[in-house]
């Protein structure tokens, strides 16, 4: 059964290590999502930040968002603002959910996107609060129990918080 495994990371560095290990375990860019607060302020634009981002595989948009190369490898990275939550950086399938109808839905915002991705509403509310408090929400799409176990093991190995699994909604069969 298809499902997603979720966790929160406390720092971008912790999230990068988790994503790196997920990629090494065979999960692709379209399987991994990241949602994090956009902590840039106007002072960030007034100072030059010397990084090694140009030496890595990702430059431009992802480096400009202040996230590292591993998060930058994920599909569809972008910045958006959600009323009541604030500015966010999203990558992977969650970006599409947030940019699509979930933001304008009945539940709205991050909660609507997460519920649409198969997370129960009470957990979606908890994750939204965690992101609002500065944590990074990570999720990985899994095809079977073996992949779910691998993702959970990676999350645990990196001391991630709030590890849970949600069934993915499937399209009704004709």
Image (cartoon, grey):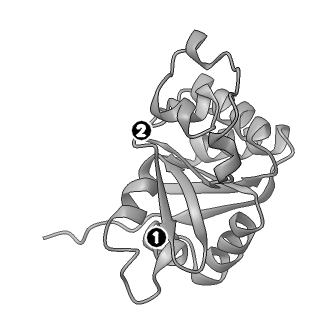
| The C terminus lies in quadrant | bottom left
Disc 1 is placed on an element classified as helix
Residue in front for this viewpoint, 44 or 68: 44
Q: Quadrant of residue 164?
A: bottom right
Q: Quadrant of residue 105?
A: bottom left
Residue in front for this viewpoint, 125 or 150: 125
Q: Earlier in the sequence, mark 1 or mark 2?
A: 2
Left or right for 118, reference 149: left
Residue in front for this viewpoint, 57 or 34: 57
Instruction: Residue at 69% x, 64% y: name it.
Output: 131
Classify mark 2: residues with Cα within 10 Å, few (<14), some (14-19) or many (20+): many
Disc 2: which residue = 75
Instruction: Residue at 59% x, 9% y: name it.
Output: 55
In this view, 66 is above or below 126: above
Disc 1: which residue = 113
Residue 1 visible in the current orientation = no
Q: Position of residue 166 (x, y in %)?
A: 57, 65
Instruction: Residue at 70% x, 47% y: name it.
Output: 43
Instruction: Residue at 42% x, 40% y: name it.
Output: 30
Mark 1–mark 2 Cα distance, whole angstroms, equals 17 Å
Residue 140 badge: none
Residue 116 visible in the current orientation = yes
Q: Position of residue 68 (x, y in %)?
A: 64, 31
Q: Are marks 1 and 2 in contact (CB under 8 Å)?
A: no
């Amino acid at each position: 059964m298809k499902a997603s495994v979720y966790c929160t990371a406390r720092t971008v560095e912790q999230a990068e290590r988790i994503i790196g290990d997920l990629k090494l375990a065979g999960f692709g860019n379209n399987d991994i999502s990241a949602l994090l607060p956009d902590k840039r302020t106007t002072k960030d634009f007034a100072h030059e930040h010397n990084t090694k981002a140009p030496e890595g595989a990702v430059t431009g948009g992802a480096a400009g968002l202040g996230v590292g190369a591993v998060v930058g490898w994920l599909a569809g990275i972008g910045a958006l603002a959600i009323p009541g939550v604030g500015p966010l950086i999203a990558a992977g399938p969650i970006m599409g959910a947030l940019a699509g109808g979930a933001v304008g839905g009945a539940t709205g915002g991050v909660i609507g996107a997460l519920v649409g991705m198969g997370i129960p509403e009470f957990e979606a509310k908890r994750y939204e609060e965690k992101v609002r408090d500065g944590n990074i929400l990570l999720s990985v799409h899994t095809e079977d129990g073996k992949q779910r176990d691998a993702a959970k093991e990676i999350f645990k190995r990196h001391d991630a918080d709030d590890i849970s699994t949600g069934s993915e909604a499937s399209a009704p069969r004709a």
